[in-house]
Image (cartoon, rainbow, N blue to C red):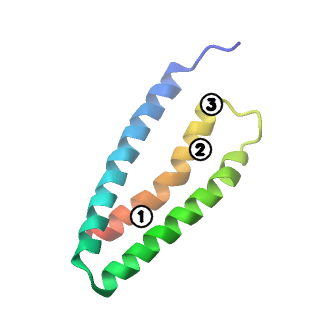
Amino acid sequence: MTKPDHAAWSSLAMESWSLSYEAASVMWMRSLRIMAGGKLAEREAERMMREKFVANLMLWPALMLGGVAQSPAQLSARALRHYSGPVRANHRRLSR
């Protein structure tokens, strides 16, 4: 059995915390937009559901790009990368 890479797990913990903070900010901004109502709210709700569906549908192929012999840390990092791009893009878009 191999020894765990503590540096990798520490880095993943920080990346996870950062992503969760940014995702919470996006949820808050989206909630405000949806509560305002109107066409913009409808488009945001539809966009949110479409993005979530596609992101979850594409997670498994994204994870398998690294092959079947990946470590848990590698799979975790790949999942974080998969979700962080869209979350950051939404944060930028909604912050304007």
User: Residue farthest to the bottom?
Assistant: 39
Q: Hey, which quadrant is residue 67 in on the image?
A: top right
Q: Would you call the spot at circle 3 few (<14 residues within 10 Å), some (14-19), or many (20 or more)?
A: few
Q: Amino acid at mark 1?
A: Ala
What residue is at 58 percent from the left and 65 percent from the top? Answer: 54
Residue 88 percent coordinates (x, y) = 40, 58
Q: Would you call the spot at circle 2 few (<14 residues within 10 Å), some (14-19), or many (20 or more)?
A: some
Residue 5 percent coordinates (x, y) = 56, 20
Q: Hey, which quadrant is residue 96 in on the image?
A: bottom left
Q: Which residue is mark 3?
A: 72
Q: Secondary structure at mark 1?
A: helix
Residue 26 percent coordinates (x, y) = 33, 60
Q: Would you call the spot at circle 1 few (<14 residues within 10 Å), some (14-19), or many (20 or more)?
A: few
What residue is at 42 percent from the left and 39 percent from the top? Answer: 15
Q: Amino acid at mark 2?
A: Arg
Q: Which mark is residue 89?
A: 1
Q: Which residue is mark 2?
A: 78
Calculate the distance from the C-alpha at mark 3 to the C-alpha at mark 2.
Answer: 10 Å
User: Residue farthest to the right?
Assistant: 68
- Of residue 46 and residue 9, the one placed in the foreground of this image is 46
Calculate the distance from the C-alpha at mark 3 to the C-alpha at mark 1.
Answer: 27 Å
In the displayed structure image, the side of residue 85 where residue 1 appears, left or right: right
Q: Earlier in the sequence, mark 3 or mark 2?
A: 3
Calculate the distance from the C-alpha at mark 1 to the C-alpha at mark 2.
Answer: 18 Å
Q: Secondary structure at mark 3?
A: helix
How many callouts does the rendering have?
3
